[in-house]
Image (cartoon, rainbow, N blue to C red):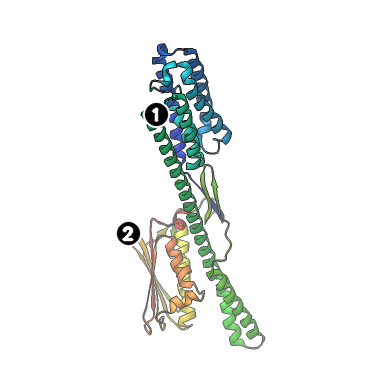
Amino acid sequence: MARLERVVRMSVEQPLWRALTAYRVLTLIYAVLLAGFRDKTYDRPWVAIAFLAVMSIWTLATLPRVAGAASCTKRFLGIDLAIALTGILLTPLADFSAQHVDGPTLPSIWTAGSVLAFALKGGWRWAAFASTLVAAANIVERGEPSRDTFHNVLLVWVASIAIGYVVEVARASERTLARALEIEAATRERERLARDIHDSVLQVLAMVQRRGSALGGEAAELGRMAGEQEVALRTLVSSGLVPTTRVSEDTAEGAVVRTVDVDIDEGSGPSECDLRTLLARHAGSRVSFAEPGAPVLLAPGAARELAAAVSAALDNVRVHAGEGAQAWILVEDEPDEVIVTVRDDGPGIPEGRLDQAEGEGRLGVALSIRGRLRELGGTAELISVPGQGTEVELKVPKVSRGKAGSAR
């Protein structure tokens, strides 16, 4: 058996970085075309040409920098904003009438890209810092700022802060989702370990306790110690202290969750398994086995888990119904699902006993039966009437909705 590690990378802000990359290119083209149409109106066209050349080279050369938060460093943001501010302040040198007539600055709306980069990188506080500097530069450039100037400055300031706040909320959501996935994976792994422990170690300890008490003498002392260890191990399993190896990271590229999902068989194996061959070994003088005449095919992992759940149900019959109890296994092969029913003629289960057993750490029904079926996307229904025996109905879809059936 080998472990299958699944790496999930989530980043709700990554599309925003891709949009910013496209925005910078499009606004660069717009600024160049706008300057080309106004070329004859510039008093010093060489100032505009020189600045736009620098801005074009910088924009195209630094496109990889705005591909994500990791590459968009503080130093890059500082230089990028400095270029935008320089372009705004150079506008009156290229066009003497810029301080008296409302018109676009040399970088035009390209400046907003610098502010948005601050918002995506550091949230609304960084956005407020960058947009405030841009606002100050625009007011200085205008000399006598008009109503339109204040309107445009306020629009950039509010929009950038809003986007920065949205990014912070998105990052918090990423962390919450990553933590939820981590907890879900850890819980699933803990339940798997608890099932394995219940089906092996706990069963052996319980048997040693019963046999030791029956034999007496030194065996009784050994049985007593086995009983104490059984209680301690059940407490450990039910309290969730089984260690897990889950890692949750919050990087600049988004939240990363690494989970170990399931065990898988190494090498190639059969795509389907006949469930009858796994259940037939339970047949005996006290267990009757009824099966269809044709093979009951399931995915190997689903067949093994279903057979283990049946084995756990029979273990409960032997332990709680007595050695003399009779049990029946019925397998039904439906078009969309497989149904296995385990019934016994024991005394039944008193009302509330299952909840009490789960509280005591006895998780045979909760984990070994219901937990396995839940992993397969199936259901386990237990019907018991005191004095009339117990019936456990296990249903598994042929196309498993759980991980165990699809990955094994």
**Looking at this rendering, what residue extends furthest in the right direction?**
218
Q: Which residue is mark 1?
A: 149
- Counting from the top left corner in percent of width and height, residue 283 is at 45, 73
> Would residue 147 be seen by someone viewing this image from the given angle?
yes
Determine the CA span between mark 2 and mark 1.
Answer: 71 Å
Q: Which residue is mark 2?
A: 335
The residue at 36%/81% (across/down) is 385
Say whether residue 232 is left or right of residue 187.
right
Element under disc 2: loop
Q: Quadrant of the N terminus?
A: bottom right
The residue at 49%/75% (across/down) is 359
**Looking at this rendering, what residue extends furthest in the bottom direction?**
217
- Counting from the top left corner in percent of width and height, residue 146 is at 38, 27
Q: Are marks 2 and 1 in contact (CB under 8 Å)?
A: no
Q: Nearer the viewer, residue 252 or 212?
A: 252
Element under disc 1: helix
> Would residue 282 be seen by someone viewing this image from the given angle?
no
Where is 250 relative to 65, above or below? Answer: below
Q: Nearer the viewer, residue 100 or 280?
A: 100
- Counting from the top left corner in percent of width and height, residue 243 is at 59, 62
Q: Nearer the viewer, residue 296 or 132?
A: 132
**Looking at this rendering, what residue extends furthest in the front direction?**
144
- Counting from the top left corner in percent of width and height, residue 87 is at 49, 23
Q: Quadrant of residue 100?
A: top left
Say whether residue 273 is left or right of residue 208.
left
| Nearer-N-terminus badge (2/1) | 1
**Which amino acid is tagged 2?**
Pro
Where is 35 relative to 73, above or below? Answer: above
Q: Nearer the viewer, residue 141 or 20?
A: 141
